[in-house]
Amino acid sequence: MKKDEAPRSRPLTAANDNSSALAPAAVDAALTRIAEAIGRHIAREHVRARKAANDNDLS
């Protein structure tokens, strides 16, 4: 028997076959919070850009 054909004591698992420790609802909640944070950041950038463009106001 060749070395590659030796019987294995346990089955092979793929390197990227990670089991999720979180429930799907927890993952969805975390992704929603991340998306909200990204949206707030983008909104802040747009507000700053508008204020910078309108800095000649007399008020």
Image (cartoon, grey):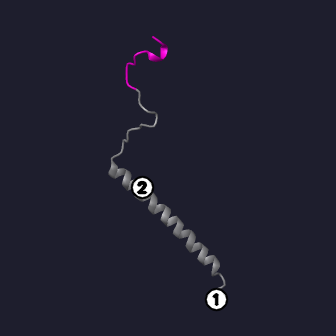
Disc 2 secondary structure class: helix
Disc 1 secondary structure class: loop
Marks 1 and 2 close (CB-CB < 8 Å): no
Residue 35 place in picture, x, y as percent: 45, 60
Residue 7 place in picture, x, y as percent: 40, 16
Residue 55, by quadrant, is: bottom right
* Residue extending furthest toward the bottom: 58
Residue 46, by quadrant, is: bottom right
Quarter of the figure that contains the C terminus: bottom right
Q: Nearer the viewer, residue 16 or 36?
A: 16
Q: Nearer the viewer, residue 17 or 28?
A: 17
Relative to 58, 2 lies left or right: left
Main SS category, magenta section = loop
Relative to 57, 4 lies left or right: left
Q: What's the amino acid at mark 1?
A: Leu
**Sequence-wise, which precedes: disc 1 or disc 2?**
2
- Residue at numbered disc 1: 58
Q: Nearer the viewer, residue 20 or 7?
A: 7
Residue at the spot 48% in from the left edge and 14% down from the top edge: 3
Residue 2 place in picture, x, y as percent: 48, 13
- Residue at numbered disc 2: 31
3 w.r.t. 12: above or below = above
Q: Nearer the viewer, mark 1 or mark 2?
A: 2
Residues shaded magenta: 1-11
Residue 34 place in picture, x, y as percent: 45, 57
